[in-house]
Amino acid sequence: MRKDVSEKKGGRKKASIADPDLVEQLEENLESHTAGSPVKPGQRWTNRSAMDLADELGEQGYSIDRKTVQRILKNDLQLGHRQIAKKLSMGESVDRDAQFQVMQQYRTQFLDQGFPVLSIDTKKKESLGNFYRRGPAWTDADVRAWDHDFPSYAWGKVIPFGVYDVGRNEALMYLAQGFDTGQLVVDAIRRWWFRLGQWSYPAESPILLLADCGGSNGYRVPLFREQLQLLANRLNREIRVSHLPPYCSKYNPIDHRLFCHVTRSLQAMLLSSIEIVRDAIARTTTRTGLRVVTELARRLYRKGVKAAPEYLANETVIRDEHLPKYNYVFVPE
C-alpha cells in the first residue's frame, strides 16, 4: 500500500534529539565565553567559530562537526550571526530636534519654489598608488596590489568634495589635492554653479547649503564664511547655510545618496592616478537616475590659510534669530 505523502519518512535523528545533553553543553560553553562581551548580562555571545566550538565539544566527549554546531546555534539556541552595528551616538546636541525642524522648513521652502538645495561634504581621502581596495571585479587577469598599505608608499592623496543637488539628483565631485580647507569647499560650490547650476535654475534664485557642523565647512570656520560671502558677491545671489546639529553628520543627504554609490564605483580598483579616480567616479549611476560630473581642481590647497582680518572685524553674515549659530545667510554686496 502506498504511503501518504504527508507521512514523515525515516532518517537520522537530529543531533539535539539524539543527544539531548549536547545543546545544554554547548550553551554552557557559550556562557564561559560571554564574560567581557559587548552584550548585556544574560544574553549569549561568542566570537568563536563553529569549528572551535565543535573541537571543544569533541574534547568533552561529543562527536559533532562544524555544520551541526551551526544548526544548533541557529535552530535550537536561536542565535544569529551578526556584526557590531555602529549605532551608538558619541554625544547628543540639545538643539538636535529643533535644528532638524528648521532645516526641513528651509529645504521644503526652497524645493517648492524650484530653488537649489545642495548637500555638501568631503568624502574620505583616497591614497594614490597600488593599494588594495575591497570588492570583487570580473577579470581574466591577475590583479595585484601592494601587500602593505603604508602611507609613505602613496604617490599623493585625493580629496573628493561632493556637491549634491537634492532636487535634481545630480552632483559635482571636485577632486583636489593638498588640504581640506574652506577655500576648497567654496571653490567646489562655485564650480557646481558654472558646470550644472546655471543651466538648471533661474539667475535670481538663492542657494541653500546643507552642511555638517564640523570640518572645513563647519559653523565655526571663519574662512568658510568669508569665502561664501565672496561667492555670493560673484554670483550676485543669496546663499543660505543650514548646518546639521552635532553628532548627526550621517543624516546629511549626500552620504546615502551619493557617497555610497561613489564608493561602489571605486571598489576593486588600483587608484594609480587622479585621472583614474576622476573617470571612475564619473561613471557612477543608479537606477533612480543619479548623474555625477567630476572636475579636477586647478590649484593646490594649502594648510594654514585664514580669513582676512578686515573680514573678521566686519563680518557681513546675517544670522537667524532662532538657532543663529547653525542658520545664516549671505547677501551680495
Image: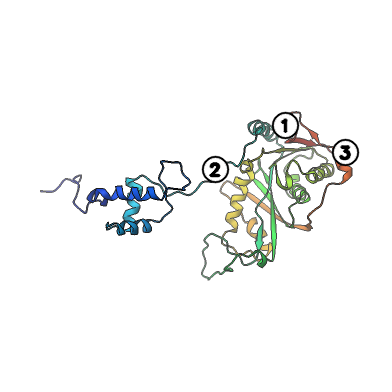
- Residue 308 is left or right of residue 121, and the answer is right
Instruction: Give the amino acid type for the residue marked by disc 1 in the picture.
Output: Leu
- Could you say which quadrant of the image residue 98 lies in? top right
Q: Which residue appears at 64% of the width and 45% of the height? A: 254
Residue 131 seen in this snapshot? yes
Disc number for residue 87? 2
Instruction: Give the amino acid type for the residue marked by disc 2 in the picture.
Output: Lys
Tell which circle, 1 or 2, labels the residue nearer the N-terminal end. Answer: 2
Instruction: Give the amino acid type for the residue marked by disc 3 in the picture.
Output: Asn
Q: Which class describes the residues within 10 Å of circle 2: few (<14), some (14-19), or many (20+)? A: few
Tell me how far mark 1 sits from mark 2, CA to CA. 26 Å
Hey, which residue is sitting farthest top in the picture? 321
- Could you say which quadrant of the image residue 56 lies in? bottom left
SS at mark 2 in the image = loop
SS at mark 1 in the image = loop
- Residue 246 is left or right of residue 332, and the answer is left
Tell which circle, 3 or 2, labels the residue nearer the N-terminal end. Answer: 2
Q: Which class describes the residues within 10 Å of circle 1: few (<14), some (14-19), or many (20+)? A: some
Q: Are marks 3 and 2 in contact (CB under 8 Å)?
A: no
- Residue bearing the label numbered 3: 314
Q: Pick the residue in front: 258 or 125.
A: 125
Tell me how far mark 3 sits from mark 2, CA to CA. 42 Å
- Residue bearing the label numbered 1: 323
